[in-house]
Amino acid sequence: MGSIHTTARRGRGARLASVVAGAAAVALLATGCSSPSDAGASGSAAPAGDASITFIPKQLNNPYTDVVLGGGEAGAKEAGFGAVGIVGPLNASASSQVTLINAETQAGTDVIVIAANDPDAVGPALEEARAGGAKIVAFDSDTNPAYRDVFISQVVSEDVAKIQLEMISEQIGGAGDIAILSATANATNQNGWIDFMETELANNPDYADINLVAKVYGDDDDTKSFQEAQGLLQAYPDLKGIISPTTVGIAATARYLSTSKYKGKVALTGLGLPNEMRPFVKDGTVEAFALWDPAQLGYVAAYAGKALDDGTITGAVGDSFTAGELGERTVEEGGVVIVGPPTMFNAENIDDYDF
Amino acid sequence: MSEVTTADPKPDTADTLSDDTGGRTGWTRILLGRDVIMIYALLAFVTYAVIAIPRFASPVTVGFLLLDVIPILMIAMPMTLIIITGEIDLSVASTAGLASALLGVLWADTGNIVLAVGVALLVGALAGAFNGVLVAFVGLPSLAVTIGTLALFRGLALVIIGDNAVADFPRGLTTFFTSKVGGTGIPTVMVGVAVIALIFGTLLHFTPFGRGLYAMGFSKDAARFVGIKVPRAKFWLYVAAGLVSALAGIYWTLRYSSARSDNASGLELAVIAAVLLGGVSIFGGKGSIPAVIAGVLLIGTINYALRLNRVSAVVLIIVTGSLLIASVVAPSAWAGFKSWRHERELHRDLPEVTTSGSPSA
């Protein structure tokens, strides 16, 4: 007995479904023709009168970024923002940031705080946001100055470069080959520090015997940074020191060194988070490294955003605003606001910090 | 023939056979096919978004959404044809990255944008031809070949441009790529994308070549016996995929005004997910261009609407993945349910077979 289709019920159901589908299509065409303005007024994220702020870091799942954003959120709430948002790409790419900026432009956010993965790629999107009335604060990693109102720098760029060179010079005895393991190849902040370091190495007589042999990029990805560190030591067996001006890079390199034969022989320094670096300082892999309080960076950025939104400052040189508990901050040359001096961590003081 | 006793009910097969059309015809076929379900799903979600998500219904949405979705849409066109023939191409995003790197380096070195774009397109076509030769003429499995070229082309991009990025493209060109048509908010480049979609749609649905692709997907050998030139067709499909990927890479570079070796990284998975969501069977032989376009727009709209509500990127990936699994499982589940229902009706409508004699069916 072959199969026999009993399709009587199916025929009726199909006809009914096709009528419903047709009605749905007609209804949709009607809604599609509604003018944009009344849909826009039908709901808003923040209560009227309260400003909104969104932070866009370089990437999510980055422990340093988490601390900065924690400070930023706290600062934003204190400063009086009604809606605080945090969005970020999963990998440190500029194109993902553009999509997020566009979403903020459409949402009508008042202040966008961004750490740029590429100083120029995010430009056009930021310009559209500004045309929509948003104020742009760059923090951590600057954009091209034309695209932002003010840049919050954690410390003076030169000081960051200088302190890292001082530490490595001390640790390798003033002479030898060193290498740099950075984050992404386009990151404005790291590239700025590296440029200063290269200038210092070339001009400063104290560093005449130190050679920079390689610059590699770990893309702020733990695995890639680990592999780049491995590669460095294989390619340059006489390497005396590594500078890693990124918390992901220094943590990965320390992990590699502490389990390799180079532990104690190759000096490692750079910018690291005390909580991540504590075991490596205790077991002797790392002698000293530097950073600042990242939470303060986010905090000042939030207050700068509020000042811009209120009209207290416009980003011109000489403007000053109050950054909550941290006191007065002044806008310096190039629209830059400095948060504070860097801190050096070593075995003696590392237990005093918890971030 | 044994006699039917009056105690047995007479089986009435008249209605059964006359109502059995053997498939849908007329309006039900056009309005209820798997392909059109995707378009309904897109319309339904857009309706929901317009009503429930604030600030979604504005010309700005159309602009931003389409700008984001264009590379996926472009590459999905040749990818649909390739998957319908039963093959796959995982190297599309790497070809786009290679084109992007070439564009950046040539522009930085020569300052001649036309030359740079031309060379990038040519290299894209050559990359596709490389894939095509290995898959169609040498006969290697496309999955293996394109995984290899995925790494090869991305590596070439890295060799060409290194860790640098080229960002100073001509302003006129970059603003053109983000400009919109009049007041509608639709990006100007959508015209080119619509042309590409039309070309591939016509090719697939209205030419003998396109019918041949379906045949190839069902059975390569049967298609060969029927006279379809299978290797040649597949070769040209891969060349087309390479060319369109290079075009997508050029668009990506000029829209973001940034040529990097990791541009369009991971795009191939988004394209394949959208194509499969659009109803194309991964085993080949089934699929249509309008449904794929609806699939791409559906994923794009869902991502856009969720991002507008500041939902985290992790959740977006989960949503896209679940959608993809549902789209692959749902047809099988539906077919299973229908056959269960059919078996039930069969047992109810037709009489039991008795040992005293059976009425012939």
Image (tube, coloured by chain):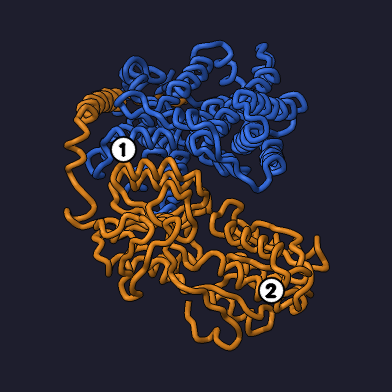
**Residue at point 27%, 56% (across, down):** A309
In the picture, measured across the screen, residue B171 lies left or right of residue A212, that is left
Q: Nearer the viewer, residue A130 or A283?
A: A130
Q: Is residue A182 above or below residue B281?
A: below
Q: CA distance from mark 1 to mark 2?
A: 58 Å
User: In terms of secondary structure, where does tag 2 sit?
Assistant: helix
Which of discs 1 and 2 lies nearer the camera? The answer is 2
Residue A210 x %, y %: 76, 68
Q: Which mark is residue A324?
A: none
Which residue matches tag 2? A168
Q: Nearer the viewer, residue B190 or B169?
A: B169
Tell me the blue chain: B
Residue A259 appears in which quarter of the rendering? bottom right
Residue B352 x %, y %: 38, 33
Q: Is residue B85 above or below residue A204?
A: above
Q: Few, some or many C-alpha atoms within 10 Å of disc 1 (few <14, some 14-19, many ≥20)?
A: some
Which residue matches tag 1? B45
**Residue at point 34%, 45% (across, down):** A130
**Residue at point 70%, 60% (across, down):** A228
Chain A display color: orange
The N terminus of chain B - image quarter:
top left
Chain to which the residue tagged by mark 2 belongs: A
Instruction: Name the kind of residue labelled 2 in the image.
Output: Ile
* Contact? badges 1 and 2 (CB < 8 Å): no
Residue B203 x %, y %: 53, 15
Q: Is residue B12 above or below residue A136?
A: above
